[in-house]
């Protein structure tokens, strides 16, 4: 019986796992510097929360959720995204209150049952940031700038920012009617899903990727031409703000969120570097979502970065964060039985002094011990035999240059300091 990871689920192995962690840390740092504080959310929630917040006629809710029942028969789902949980938690713990501004970020695995491909997994990672309690267009600009400046553009190859406006409950219904009219006129030229969504969620039709639908959708009426004065002004201020920041963007008329509580700005960062156009981060404003989930009248704007896609793109560009220093500073190898307790003492004192150190205990041949030290990514190997034991020293060899020195192991600060300094031959 051989076990394998489920389809679409990836084990992250070293050294890739370390680079992935560094990238996550970088994103965390970027959000932190823009004032976002971390919220840790559960990996599963009531299935109904996602249906209600993401919307019944979306890919996620229609076919991508991992559903299961609790012992009491309640219907639960692995989270397919973070915003729903975040808003649920913010309402539950009174972080989403009229008149209060809250900047929160989350990070972690998400689950969607879709067809696995490069950059499309069934368990993947997102990092997301949300601003609750502001309807100011400059907060849209600031949120976009946070990602464009610091997580992205310069380090992601061929990345472009797309934006659009979803309007608001004042102006969108009017546009929706015009769109439905148009789609119905072209009913015969659309795919099965688009025909169905013309009735259930017409804005989502614009998002269809099926080639035969493209000509009709390309010529569909543009939402931005039907905005009410307030939405027009919000959108203009976001566009002017981005220009003022020197952040270039393209207005993309087919960039939509299908649901009523998504309002005003919608945005997406895409890159063509991976072949097919790929969205590596996306977000938008949702002034109606908190109320829709049972909270007060609290506007919000947020985004989510797909970490696997960001990783692939930055790997391609050679702009992944760099690991500082070796994985292991020193590998300690006792050459005889009597030196083993001495080896343990040295390992403990080095680790206490901030030096990463491993013991090489299972190898009886010196050559094998060196090979293991190299495989573990060690910078130095330290040998302990009878001489070292009796004199309280350790013989240390720098693996890359072969430069060897004998150093006292006491006081421990002395040894750890010597290991951090440039390793040059002792003067003869
Ligand atoms: P797509 O159109 O590619 O399916 P989406 O609209 O479903 O994306 P969002 O729900 O907006 O994506 O999620 C935000 C980001 O999370 C995406 O831009 C992408 O980078 C990432 N993402 C979404 N689904 C997956 C997945 N299955 N595997 C890896 N990353 C994903
Ligand atoms: Mg999707």
Image (cartoon, rainbow, N blue to C red):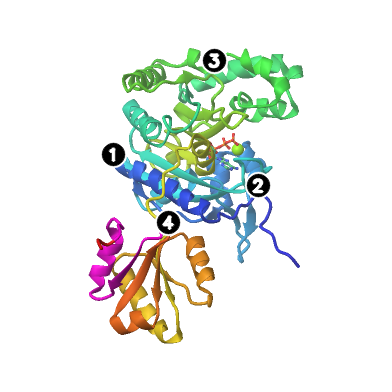
Q: Mark 1 or mark 3: which comes first in sequence? A: 1
Q: Are marks 3 and 2 in contact (CB under 8 Å)?
A: no
Q: Residues within 10 Å of mark 3 (few under 14, many from 20)?
A: some
Q: Are marks 1 and 4 in contact (CB under 8 Å)?
A: no
Which of labels 1 and 4 is toward the front? 4
Residue 252 is left or right of residue 57, and the answer is left
Q: Are marks 3 and 4 in contact (CB under 8 Å)?
A: no
> Helix or strand or loop: what does disc 3 sit on?
loop
Tell me the residue that label 1 is attached to: 99
The residue lying at 32 percent from left, 23 percent from top is 245
The residue lying at 69 percent from left, 51 percent from top is 7
The residue lying at 70 percent from left, 26 percent from top is 210
Tell me the residue that label 4 is attached to: 400
Answer yes or no: disc 3 within 8 Å of ligand 1: no
Q: Mark 1 or mark 4: which comes first in sequence? A: 1
Tell me the residue that label 2 is attached to: 113
């Amino acid at each position: 019986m051989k076990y394998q990871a489920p389809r679409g689920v990836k084990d992250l192995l070293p050294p890739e796992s370390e680079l992935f962690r560094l990238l996550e840390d970088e994103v965390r740092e970027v959000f932190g510097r823009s004032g976002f504080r971390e919220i840790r959310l559960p990996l599963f929630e009531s299935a109904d929360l996602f249906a209600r917040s993401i919307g019944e006629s979306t890919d996620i809710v229609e076919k991508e959720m991992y559903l299961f029942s609790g012992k009491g028969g309640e219907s639960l789902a692995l989270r397919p995204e973070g915003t729903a949980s975040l808003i649920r938690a913010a309402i539950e713990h009174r972080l989403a209150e009229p008149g209060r501004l809250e900047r929160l970020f989350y990070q972690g695995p998400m689950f969607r049952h879709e067809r696995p491909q490069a950059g499309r997994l069934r368990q993947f990672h997102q990092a997301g940031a949300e601003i609750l309690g502001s309807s100011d267009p400059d907060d849209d600009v600031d949120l976009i700038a946070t990602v464009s400046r610091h997580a992205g553009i310069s380090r992601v190859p061929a990345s472009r920012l797309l934006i659009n406006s979803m309007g608001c409950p004042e102006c969108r219904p009017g546009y929706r009617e015009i769109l439905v009219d148009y789609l119905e006129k072209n009913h015969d030229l659309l795919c099965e899903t688009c025909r169905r969504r013309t009735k259930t969620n017409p804005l989502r039709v614009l998002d269809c990727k099926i080639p035969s639908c493209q000509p009709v959708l390309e010529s569909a009426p543009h939402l931005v031409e039907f905005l009410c004065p307030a939405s027009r002004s919000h959108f203009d201020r976001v566009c002017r703000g981005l220009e003022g920041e020197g952040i270039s963007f393209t207005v993309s008329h087919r960039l939509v969120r299908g649901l009523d509580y998504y309002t005003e700005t919608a945005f997406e960062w895409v890159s063509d570097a991976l072949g097919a156009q790929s969205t590596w981060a996306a977000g938008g404003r949702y002034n109606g979502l908190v109320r829709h989930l049972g909270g007060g009248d609290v506007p919000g704007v947020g985004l989510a970065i797909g970490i696997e896609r960001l990783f692939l793109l930055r790997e391609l560009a050679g702009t992944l964060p760099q690991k500082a220093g070796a994985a292991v500073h020193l590998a300690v190898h006792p050459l005889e039985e009597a030196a083993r307790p001495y080896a343990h003492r040295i390992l403990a004192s080095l680790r206490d002094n901030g030096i990463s150190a491993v013991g090489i205990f299972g190898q009886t041949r010196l050559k094998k011990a060196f090979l293991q030290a190299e495989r573990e990514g060690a910078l130095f190997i330290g040998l302990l035999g009878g001489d070292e034991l009796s004199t309280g020293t350790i013989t240390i060899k720098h693996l890359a240059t072969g430069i060897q020195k004998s150093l006292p192991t006491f006081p421990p600060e002395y040894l750890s300091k010597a290991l951090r300094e440039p390793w040059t031959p002792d003067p003869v």
